[in-house]
Amino acid sequence: RFQIAVNESTYLRLVGKVRSLRRTWTQYELVIHNCNNFVSEIASSVGLRTPLLTAQYPVGYVTELRALNAPLISRK
């Protein structure tokens, strides 16, 4: 788990992305529409680097996401 600080415009872009994904992702598919892919879409929308492989356990995905963005994060 980690956090990044965002300004108001980035936050609004993030909220818009979540709303868009909620409308368009109507089915869960292990390879295409999985929880890691959802996180990847959100992270990309705020300018974070994301792991290439989303088909992995979530704990591994978040660990890799954290490592890719280490200078930007605030550890909790």
Image (spheres, rainbow, N blue to C red):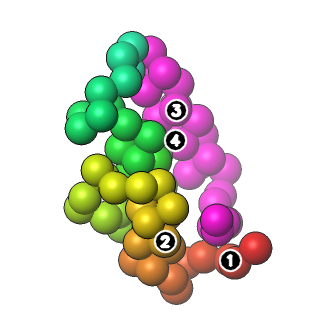
In this picture, is 23 found above or below 70? Answer: above
| Res 65 quadrant in image | bottom left
SS under mark 3: helix
Q: Which residue is mark 1?
A: 74
Q: Position of residue 50 (x, y in %)?
A: 35, 63
Q: Position of residue 21 (x, y in %)?
A: 43, 27
- Given the image, on which type of amino acid does mark 4 rest? Arg
Write down the region rendered in magenta.
1-24
Is residue 22 or residue 35 the one in the foreground? 35
Q: Nearer the viewer, mark 3 or mark 2?
A: 2
Q: CA distance from mark 4 to mark 2?
A: 24 Å
Q: Classify residue 66 as left or right of residue 36.
A: right
Q: Which residue is mark 2?
A: 63
What kind of element bears circle 2? helix
**At x 36% / y 67%, what residue is drawn?**
49
Q: CA distance from mark 3 to mark 2?
A: 22 Å
- Judged from the image, the secondary structure of the residue bearing numbered disc 4 is helix
Q: Position of residue 42 (x, y in %)?
A: 46, 46
Q: From this view, report whether residue 60 is shown above or below residue 38.
A: below
The residue shown at (24%, 34%) is 32
Towards the viewer: 70 or 10: 70
| Residue type, numbered disc 3 | Val
**Label annotation for residue 13:** 4
Residue 53, label in figure: none
Quadrant (top left/top right/bottom left/bottom right) for the N terminus: bottom right
Q: Amino acid at mark 2?
A: Thr
